[in-house]
Amino acid sequence: MKVLGIVFSPRKNGNTEIIVREALEGAREAGAEAELITTRDYKINPCDGCGSCHKTGECRINDDMQIMYKKLLEADGIIFGTPVYFWQMCAQAKIFIDRTYALTFPNLKLSNKVAAAIAVAGRTGAVETLNFFNRYFISNHMICAESVEGLAYEKGSIVNDERGMKAARELGKQIVLMIKGGNRFPEEHNIPLYRIAQERYGASRYPKPSKQ
């Protein structure tokens, strides 16, 4: 059982990295193997909208995102950590998320993985950022754990946010419990809207979940 923590912050040992590490400690305490990745250590280019993944099921861009795809697929649980810049996730996070579009063809390869987000903000924007990630998780048929909002103004000051740090550690434990629980996203035929679409039009609007 493996929990992957992905830090999108460009700052080394910044607040986002500190709080994601705390969440991974909680996962370890609950018995999982945990790994931290900081995207600043990898070269990940933005999606260019070529659409080749629609046909091949793979992204044609040969960069370090190919490494990320493998790590995402190997993980049972995933924690996405981002700082909030101008009331939203940082640019590095959006580039990464856009590139995971390749994992939706021919099926939703991230389906049934337990996922959560941690957003670190000085004042506003964390709620909007977490709402985006929750929609992203649901659209990929992932199992949503509780998200965490961290409060920090200066580098390293996240350690003073006792409530946020405690919530992060508990999040790590919660993710492991949810993995052990074996929850699964409902299959298409169990969702009324999908069933109606299939009956009327012969196909669903969305790719089918992965069978893994």
Image (cartoon, rainbow, N blue to C red):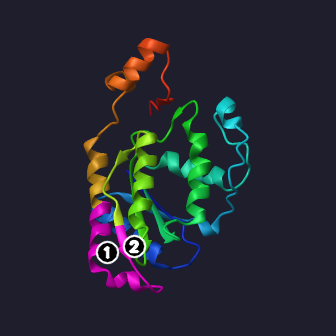
**Left or right: 139 as drawn, with respect to 44:** left
Residue 27 visible here: yes
The residues colored magenta run 149-172
Residue 54 picture location, percent across and down = 65, 32
| Callout 1 secondary element | helix
Q: Mark 2 and mark 1 in contact? Answer it, CB < 8 Å.
A: yes
Q: Residue at x 50, y 18 (%)?
A: 203
**Left or right: 35 as drawn, with respect to 45:** left
Callout 2 crowding tier (Cα within 10 Å): few <14, some 14–19, many ≥20: many
Quarter of the image holding residue 96?
bottom right
| Callout 2 secondary element | helix
Residue linked to disc 1: 165
Q: Is residue 195 above or below residue 185?
A: above
Residue 124 picture location, percent across and down = 41, 72
Q: Amino acid at mark 1?
A: Met
Residue 121 counted in the magenta span:
no
Q: Amino acid at mark 2?
A: Ile
State whether the magenta stretch is mostly helix, strand or loop. helix
Residue 76 visible here: no
Residue linked to disc 2: 19
CA–CA distance between discs 2 and 1? 6 Å
